[in-house]
Image (cartoon, coloured by chain):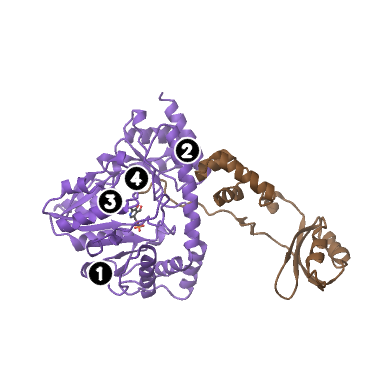
Amino acid sequence: MSPQKPLSRVVEAMPPSGIRKFFDLAQTMTGVITLGVGEPDFPTPWGVRESAIHALTRGATTYTGNSGLLELRELICADLEARHGLTYRPADECLVTSGVSEGLDLALRALLNPGDEVIVPEPSYVAYQPCVAFAGGVPVPVPADPAQGYRLDAERIAAAVTPRTKAVLFGSPSNPTGAAQSAEDLTALAALAAREDFWLVSDEIYDRLTYTGTHTSTAAVEGAWERTVLLNGFSKSYAMTGWRVGYVCAPEPVAALMHRIHQYTMLCAPHVSQVAAIEALKSADPDVTEMVADYDRRRRLFVKGLDELGLTCPEPGGAFYAFPSIRSSGLSSQDFAEQLLEEQKVAVVPGDVFGPSGEGHVRCSYATALPLLEQALERMGRFLEARR
Amino acid sequence: MHEILTVLESDARATPERIAALTGIPEDEVRAAIAGWEADGVIRRYKTVVDRDRLGDTRVTAFVDVTVAPERGRGFDDVAERIARFREIRAVHLVSGAQDLRVEVEGSSMKEVADFVAQKLSGVDRVTATSTHFLLRRYKDDGQLLIDPEPDQRLSVMP
Ligand SMILES: Cc1ncc(COP(=O)(O)O)c(C=O)c1O
């Protein structure tokens, strides 16, 4: 007899990622130009890879301490201090994780009791709401306004606050909109958090990839540090997605709980990747600067090209995504993405996978070589032309 | 403004219109800046990087370290300039270390390069010694990798 007892109800109730369907479809086709990828098209800077190869020859094949290599935590804290003026103790306020993905899970599990609500501004990164639910919480999506550049509006958030509100979870710069939040809006949010006593879980994985201004770290605004869990990592800035290394920084009491979960569920982030991360912080900033300059050129050209096609979007200030409105096509975002892929072999991600408020938009990643971006724009032009 | 040069250095054929789209600098300012640099000699010329091995080009290159007895009051400049004027010479650099000049010589065969070094280069006034290294294979030239690019291993749609 096969097992009869129900599997996890929480997990079963969670629909699989909407991105999966597109992935499966795109996989069966050749000649696809993909703007659907949420990772850099650059390989990891060579100096970082060399250091990892060397580390392997020297035996970096073991577990490290649960918190991660001390040298790495010291470099992370020094970097946060230098760039954002943040002070975290490497010893007990910084934990090296297997990517921001793990950090996100740890943060939510450490913060939430069953039924606690977490406000998630939408459109949001696909993992936020499922991770809240997996940790026993209740995600409360709050749509952001495209007309206001998807800014975090404390008033809109305030309207969704209840006595059960435990945290607001958001990313800046944002996947999928590219919106980078201003110091003023973050300050207003921090004031609301203090007044209503909730946490800020701030995913800043794209913090180095900003184009129109400098990044404001949530923990750096007035009154925010003591109620912020800061998530960051090496995947995007240093083009290190496959290494699975990131970090969380938080005040000691919550960091201690995250450490406890991590100790039992992950033991440690990959040793060799931690060595690579050390090298990244020590020597790869010039590589990052070059990549950022390159993304910025593509961003300008691509956003202008979209605009000329009537696919308008607020100027994305960070990350490597544009989130244009496709309403002028008269199609739903699923239909748009599906037909564009089938007819013109351009893969984009339908906006509704980032929440219902993403409907009417598609996410395009410009972490794509310039000639391909230009071809993709041409193909999108033909696609729209055929529908006039 | 240096953004303009960054674009041109990677694609000498980029038009002012394209450079404007990439940098956000207005097209007429791009044109004016380029014209200014061309006039000042900041932009020397527009070149194409050719992978000669792939082309099947059999020309031969050698790096030659040249020791020079410097001239009173003129240092190495006179000798370096005289050497630089030879058609066979592709590059001349004054370097630190045991030798003084490092030059790049090109010819259609090893014999031609060897003859040039023996008869012309070493005969230039004040050249006291030469040491020749023939180039066997180029892996990177002018900042351009000449080995095969790494395959893109990313999946086509990812969160
Ligand atoms: C906003 C955001 N957070 C987290 C992640 C996952 O990052 P990591 O590779 O560090 O797990 C991504 C990757 O797409 C992302 O876009």
Horizontal arrangement in the rendering, residue A272 relative to residue A248 (left or right) = right
Label 2 vs label 4, nearer the camera: 4
Q: Which residue is mark 4?
A: A177
Residue at 19% across / 56% down in the picture?
Answer: A193
> Subunit of mark 1?
A
Q: Nearer the viewer, residue A26 or B157?
A: B157
- The reply to whether residue A196 is visible in this rendering is yes
Indicate which disc, 3 or 1, sits on the residue closer to the N terminus.
3
Asked if marks 4 and 3 touch (Cβ < 8 Å), the reply is no
The residue most toward the top is A388
**Which amino acid is tagged 3?**
Asp
Q: Residues within 10 Å of mark 1 (few under 14, many from 20)?
A: many
- Chain for colour purple: A
**Which amino acid is tagged 4?**
Thr
Horizontal arrangement in the rendering, residue B145 relative to residue A275 (left or right) = right
Chain B display color? brown
Q: Which residue is mark 3?
A: A185
- Gap between marks 4 and 3 measured at Cα: 17 Å
Indicate which disc, 1 or 4, sits on the residue closer to the N terminus.
4
Q: Which residue is mark 1?
A: A259
Residue at 52% across / 62% down in the picture?
Answer: A46
Query: Do the residues at discs 2 and 4 belong to one chain?
Result: yes
Q: Nearer the viewer, residue A353 or A95?
A: A95
Label 4 vs label 3, nearer the camera: 3
Q: Which residue is mark 2?
A: A376
Q: Residues within 10 Å of mark 2 (few under 14, many from 20)?
A: many
Disc 2 is placed on an element classified as helix
- Gap between marks 1 and 2 measured at Cα: 45 Å
Label 3 vs label 1, nearer the camera: 3
As drawn, B103 above or below A145: below
